[in-house]
Amino acid sequence: MAGSCDTCAYLEYDEEDEAYYCSVDMDEDDYSHLAQSAFKGCPYYTDGDEYKVVRHQL
């Protein structure tokens, strides 16, 4: 897998539902392709670690 959803920048908390959801803007075709794909990594994964660059510079 490209990365865990727990560290993805698109994972957002919904206070009303008290749950986390993926906020990537995809349509039904994109979701269907992603769900049926043999590739297990998420093509939309973006590392949400804002300090990754800073740690690299130290």
Image: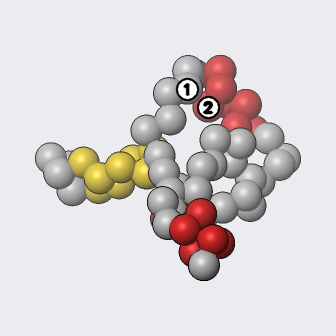
Marks 2 and 1 in Cβ contact (< 8 Å): yes
Question: Horizontal and vertical percent for residue 8?
Answer: 52, 56
Q: Nearer the viewer, mark 2 or mark 1?
A: 1
The residue beneath circle 1 is: 26
Q: Residue at x 43, y 38 (%)?
A: 23
Q: Vertically, is 29 above or below 54?
A: above
The local secondary structure at tag 2 comes to helix
- Residue extending furthest toward the right: 38
Classify mark 1: helix, strand or loop: loop
| Residue shown at the point (59%, 63%) measured from the top left | 53
Query: Which circle marks residue 31 in the picture?
Result: 2
For the N terminus, which image quadrant? bottom right
Amino acid at the residue labelled 2 = Tyr
Decide: is 51 above or below 24. below
Which image quadrant for residue 54?
bottom right
Few, some or many residues within 10 Å of mark 1 (<14, 14–19, 20+): few
Disc ID at residue 56: none
